[in-house]
Amino acid sequence: MRVDKFDDIEIYQEAFEIQRIGNEAVRRVIKENKEKGIPIVFSRNGIIYYELPNGEITTKSPFKNQ
C-alpha cells in the first residue's frame, strides 16, 4: 500500500489530535471497566483476548451467551 506524503503540516497536527482524543477515550473506558469489574476485550493478531477483573488474560469469553 502506498501512502502519499502531505505538505500541509496542519493535516498531521489534526491527525495527532484525533489520535490523542481516541487514546484518552480508550484509557477512560479501561479505567471505568476495571472499576465496575467488567472484562476488557482486545485483540492481537486476529485473536480476541479478555482481561478479567483479577488481571488474568484468557481467550475464553467470560460473557454468558444470550
Image (cartoon, rainbow, N blue to C red):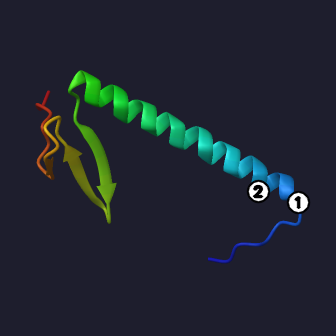
Q: Residue at x 40, y 31 (%)?
A: 29
Give the percent coordinates (x, y) of residue 21: 60, 38
Amino acid type shown at disc 1: Asp
Quadrant for the C terminus in the image? top left
Residue farthest to the right, as pictured: 8
Crowding at mark 2 (Cα within 10 Å: few <14, some 14-19, many 20+)? few
Give the percent coordinates (x, y) of residue 15: 70, 51
* Front residue of 35 and 18: 35
Q: Residue at x 70, y 73 (%)?
A: 3
Q: Residue at x 11, y 48 (%)?
A: 60
Q: Residue at x 62, y 77 (%)?
A: 1
The answer to whether 29 appears left or right of 8 in the picture is left
Q: How many marks?
A: 2
Amino acid type shown at disc 2: Tyr
Place residue 55 in its image quadrant. Answer: top left
At mark 2, the secondary structure is helix
Check contact, mark 1 vs mark 2: CB within 8 A.
yes
Q: In the drawing, what numbered circle is on residue 43?
A: none
Q: In the drawing, what numbered circle is on residue 12?
A: 2
Place residue 28 in its image quadrant. Answer: top left
At mark 1, the secondary structure is loop
The answer to whether 29 appears left or right of 34 in the picture is right
The answer to whether 59 appears left or right of 8 in the picture is left
Q: Mark 1 and mark 2: span between their CA atoms?
A: 7 Å
Place residue 53 in its image quadrant. Answer: top left
Give the percent coordinates (x, y) of residue 44: 32, 60
- Pointer 1: what residue? 8
